[in-house]
Image (tube, grey):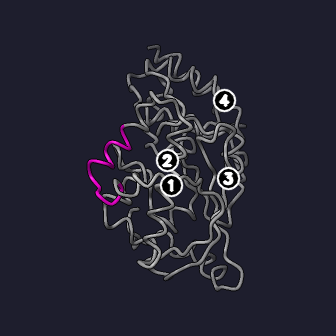
Amino acid sequence: MDLAELGAFLRSRRDRIRPADVGLPAGPRRRVPGLRRDEVALLAGASVEYYIELERGAGAQPSEQMLAALARALRLTIDERDHLYHLAGRPVPVAGGPASHVHPGMLDLLDRLTTTPAQVITDLHVTLVQNRLATALLGDQLHFEGPSRSFVFRWFTDPASRELYPRQDHDYQSRSFTADLRAAVARRDSRDREAQDLVAALLDRSPEFAERWRQREVAVRRDERKRIVHATLGTIEVNCLNLFSEDGRQRLLWFAPAVGTDAAERLELLGVVGHQDLLPHV
């Protein structure tokens, strides 16, 4: 662990990024060419005081979750991300896990999707990052811990999570989630503990999942038309589109309005009602 070098490394990475690179306004008066410390803190979901302490190397020891958030905020390459973890004395996350590195190019594309909900998830349906409209549409999906980080786990173990879809669609979603998970588990190494532990937890907690798992259906969720229930705006019909990483362990999802519906108008209203705490945390 080298906290002084960690602080210096964070400063060097912050200095090279322009606000426009991460979707922030440049503003009329800037004393630094790169990001300000408060901007990095905002992007990483940290307090300004905590981030300043990190850059000073003053004793703060960031968690693995905070390191992942900083790597995304600063658009680090995979080598830079690994270096950050080494400096902090933390183990480098395994590929496909909840602290997975999101490719800077995928984050850049996410930042440019400013008029449509979008998020990056793993193949086990763990949300890694959301844009503002995705949070407004789907709720904050980044605060869960343990197996609940996977929406598939929440779907089969937490009835409140199913409020996201109309009841008539629940059977289809259950089949689709199970078939997609089976495909993901098969793609991973048989010794992958995250995937194996998730399936074991689901088999233990959900008789419905166990029954569907025994059916051995396999189908990767790609482009789907679905109905999403919003607490304020009602049911919104969207096309859920996917962009997959090369290894298939991550996907960028974005939600486009379905043609022939009023979804476009409803999605435009997300920016207005998005900050109201009226959504179920799914």
Label 1 crowding class (10 Å Cα cut-off): few <14, some 14-19, many 20+?
Answer: some
Answer left or right for 15 relative to 131.
Answer: right
Q: What residue type is labelled 1?
A: Glu
Which corner quadrant holds the C terminus? bottom left
Residue at figure coordinates x 40%, y 37% from the top left: 196
Which residue was labeled with disc 2? Answer: 182
Residue 71, magenta (yes or no): no
Q: Quadrant of residue 222?
A: bottom right
The numbered mark, 4 or 3, whose residue comes first in the sequence reads: 4
Mark 1 or mark 2, whichever is nearer to me: 1
Which corner quadrant holds the N terminus? top left
Mark 4 or mark 1, whichever is nearer to me: 1
Which residue was labeled with disc 1? Answer: 217
Measured Cα–Cα span from mark 1 to mark 2 = 8 Å
The numbered mark, 4 or 1, whose residue comes first in the sequence reads: 4
User: Do residues under tags 1 and 2 come within 8 Å of each other at their CB atoms?
Assistant: yes
Q: What residue type is labelled 4?
A: Thr
Tag on residue 77?
4
Q: In this view, does 80 lie above or below 74?
A: above
Which residue was labeled with disc 3? Answer: 111
